[in-house]
Amino acid sequence: MLSHLVVAQSLYFGDSLFYIVCFILLMWLIKIFAWKPITKMMSDRADKISNDIDSAEKSRTDAAALVAKRQSALNASHAEAAEIVQTAKSNGQEQRDQIMAQAQADVQSLKTSAQKDIDQEREDALSHAKDDVASLSIEIASKIIQRELNADDQKALIDSYIEGLGKQHES
Amino acid sequence: MNDGPVSTFQFLGLTFSTANVVSGTIVFLIAVAVIFFASRHISMKPSKGQNFLEWLIEFTNGILKGSIPADQVSSFGLYGFTLFLFLFLSNQLGLFLQLTFHGATIVRSPTSDPIVTLTFSLMTMMLAQFSGVQRLGYKKHFANYLKPFVFWLPISIFEEFTNFLTLGLRIFGVIFSGEMLLKVIWGLATSHGIATMIVAVPIEMIWQGFSAFLGAIQAFVFVTLSTVYISQKIEEE
């Protein structure tokens, strides 16, 4: 039963040599066909995956920063809008006050000038009426006197009268 | 039973066993074919064959990482991969293909012959010695034999021989006994016609499956122990 065992017969050193050659040849073929390209591809893939992870992380932080920026811009625009509305309101208030004050002032001045005009008018009318009454009374008086005075007396009388008028006017 | 004469031939003054040469050639061709056809169209997105090879490379590298420092794995990765592939295919060959020609077996598992397994064992031992000298230098390498103390030297030297023998004979024993039991069961199956055939064939199939499992385990164990022996030599104790 042990007859087929190599140790029971002469050692086949040829087989050893054959297997060593086979093994080294196989190792060489595997290195050329599979080992080199596949390990290279595996390391390339590992690099690519780590790069992808890095870039994903980077784009994530970029996106977060962008969101924060947008949020702050939005908040700023809200505040700006509120400020604009506030300014417009205060401007309107100011303008309204100004217009009211102007209108009041206008009315006041109009009123005073109208009062002044009225006073002037009344004064004028009064003085006119005075003059008219004076000249009318003179006319009446002259008409009454005309019958009794001659031309010289009349002239003297009129002159004295005119003089009197001038004095009266001066005073 | 394997009682036929062993067919041998002489070449360049060396004796060759026909069975070993033929079986070894078949294993070699199968290995080359598997590697060649699986490694076509290597791309970033792996195809079927590439996936298989990558898985196998990861597997053998994983074995190596178990005992060899991670930065040195790459220098022994190809050795471990080739060793595992060759031994695995060798272990399986005899389970499915056994040819006898003129009464002499010419195709069987190459690993069911101790000269083959001891050849691989010797290769591992020599690689271990070579790597030890290469990485540590002659002085430190041989100083390791004197550790933990000088009187340990005979035991250290003896250990080298026992490692060499156990590594080769373990796989031989398992594969040889597996094949022998297959032959015994087949002898039982054909001994008394159809009745024994019905009983023995399922047993034969179960044993074949178990042997396939054992063959894979032994290839794994051989590579694991090889890396352990190499790691002992490339590290300073």
Image: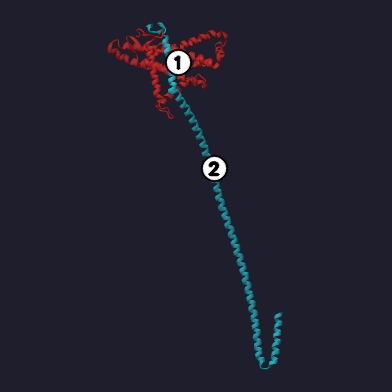
Res B222 label: 1
Colour in which chain B is drawn? red
Vertical position of residue A71 compared to residue A153: above or below: above
Mark 2 to mark 1: distance in Å?
Answer: 62 Å
Image location (x, y in percent) of residue B232: 52, 15
Amino acid of disc 1 = Phe
Chain letter for mark 2, please.
A
Q: Colour of chain A?
A: cyan
On the question of residue B236 being in view, the answer is no
Residue B61 appears at what percent x and percent y?
47, 21
Residue farthest to the front, as pictured: B12
Q: Is residue A23 above or below residue A143?
A: above
Whether residue B197 sits left or right of residue A110 in the image: it is left
* Residue B29 in sight here: yes
Image quarter (top left, top right, bottom left or bottom right) of the N terminus of chain A: top left
Q: For residue A69, which numbered disc appears in the image?
A: 2
Name the amino acid type tagged 2: Lys
Q: Quadrant of residue A166?
A: bottom right
Residue nearest the viewer, comparing B59 with A40 = A40
Which residue: 42% across, 17% down?
A: B86
In the picture, measured across the screen, residue B215 lies left or right of residue B137, that is: left
Q: Chain of mark 1?
A: B
Q: For the point 51% across and 14% down, which residue is it?
A: B130
Query: Few, some or many C-alpha atoms within 10 Å of disc 1 (few <14, some 14-19, many ≥20)?
Result: many
Q: Report the front residue among B227 and A11.
A: A11
Q: Residue at x 66, y 92 (%)?
A: A146
User: Residue, x 70% and y 89% (percent of image)?
Assistant: A157
Residue A155 picture location, percent across and down: 69, 90
Q: Nearer the viewer, residue B191 or B227?
A: B227
Q: Determine which quarter of the picture holds residue B185.
A: top left
**What is the crowding at mark 2: few (fewer than 14 residues within 10 Å), some, or many (at least 20)?**
few
